[in-house]
Amino acid sequence: SSLGYSLSPIARQTTMGGGHELPPYPKWVWSPAGGWFNYAPPNWKRNTALVAAGWGVLLAMTFRLSASNERRLCPPNRPIPSQMWCKHAKEDDPKYSCD
């Protein structure tokens, strides 16, 4: 071999770009992603929709908490987009008009 050492048949196929069998793995192991080498997990569309809905709820809760707690010690010298939905925008900047 030109590398100075001999490669195993699987390593030789891999380095040459050839495919090989998947290594042995336990079939009983559960994981949220579907386990090892599971290329078509069951219910993947439903699971993806549930995760997306969960993220949406989490983002909405974070947005509401941020909008209700945002305060400005000094009035900004230019309009800031978050002032449109901030609960205390009028108190913190009396000159602000949300029209």
Image: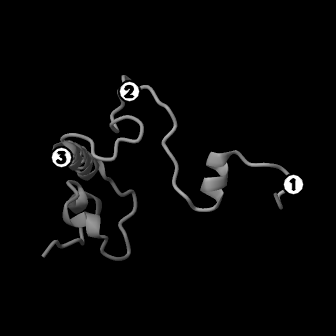
Q: CA distance from mark 3 to mark 1?
A: 55 Å
The three-letter code of the residue at mark 1 reads Gly
The three-letter code of the residue at mark 3 reads Ala
Which residue of the protein is positioned furthest toward the left in this rendering? Answer: 99
Q: Which residue is mark 3?
A: 53
Q: Which residue is mark 1?
A: 4
Which quadrant holds the N terminus? bottom right
Q: CA distance from mark 2 to mark 1?
A: 38 Å
**In front here: 89 or 29?**
29
In the rendered view, does 68 fall on the left or right side of 7? left
**In front here: 30 or 6?**
6
Q: Earlier in the sequence, mark 3 or mark 1?
A: 1
Which callout, 3 or 2, points to the residue nearer the camera? 2
The crowding category of the residue bearing disc 1, from other C-alpha atoms within 10 Å (few below 14, some 14 to 19, many at least 20), is few
Q: Regarding mark 1 in the picture, which secondary structure is present there? A: loop
The three-letter code of the residue at mark 2 reads Lys
- Indicate the position of residue 10 as horizontal and vertical percent values: 62, 47
- Indicate the position of residue 87 as horizontal and vertical percent values: 20, 54
**In front here: 79 or 25?**
25
Q: Earlier in the sequence, mark 2 or mark 1?
A: 1
Q: CA distance from mark 3 to mark 2?
A: 30 Å
The crowding category of the residue bearing disc 3, from other C-alpha atoms within 10 Å (few below 14, some 14 to 19, many at least 20), is few
In the rendered view, does 33 fall on the left or right side of 21? left
Q: Which residue is mark 2?
A: 27
Could you tell me which residue is drawn at 40 percent across and 62 percent down? 74
Q: Regarding mark 3 in the picture, which secondary structure is present there? A: helix
Q: Quadrant of residue 94?
A: bottom left
Could you tell me which residue is drawn at 83 percent across and 50 percent down? 5
Give the vertical position of 90 relative to 29 (above or below).
Answer: below
Could you tell me which residue is drawn at 40 percent across and 41 percent down? 37
- Indicate the position of residue 60 as horizontal and vertical percent values: 20, 49
In the rendered view, does 61 fall on the left or right side of 71? left
